Amino acid sequence: MNLEQVLAKIEETPADQGQVSLKAILKTLGGRSFGSFLLVSGLIILLPLVGDIPGVPTLVGVMVFLVALQLLLGREHFWLPKIIFKAQRR
């Protein structure tokens, strides 16, 4: 899957009340899209003003670490703790 296809899939992700959740993006990209998730995480941090929000770089960094570690361990699908999904709704 190339970058254009990844971005098109993310754009097709259904929004709930004008917001797209991380869980919806992960479901749209599929379980085996480690590289896509790591790329999207980096793009989120590059957005203007997003990196200035307290806690966002740390949260994204933790997610990247967890996904990269699972990739190194040879898992077929990545897993993120539910607390990350709950933290997004605040």
Image (cartoon, rainbow, N blue to C red):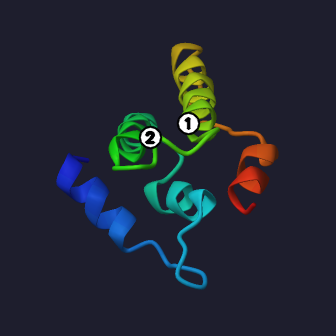
* Viewer-closest of 48 and 6: 48
Question: How far is mark 1 from mark 2, CA to CA?
Answer: 6 Å
List the residue tagged with mark 2. 41
Q: Residue 5: percent from the left, percent from the top?
A: 23, 57
Give the secondary structure at mark 2: helix
Q: Residue 52: percent from the left, percent from the top?
A: 49, 41
Q: Residue at 38% of width from left, 34% of height from top?
A: 35
* Viewer-closest of 12 and 41: 41
List the residue tagged with mark 1. 60
- Displayed quadrant of residue 12: bottom left
Residue positioned most to the bottom: 17
Q: Is residue 33 placed above or below 64 in the rendered structure?
A: below
* Viewer-closest of 66 and 28: 66
Residue kind at label 1, given as amino acid type: Val
Circle 2 residues within 10 Å: few <14, some 14–19, many ≥20: some
Q: Please report contact status of discs 1 and 2: CB closer than 8 Å, yes or no.
A: yes
Q: Is residue 65 placed above or below 45 in the rendered structure?
A: above
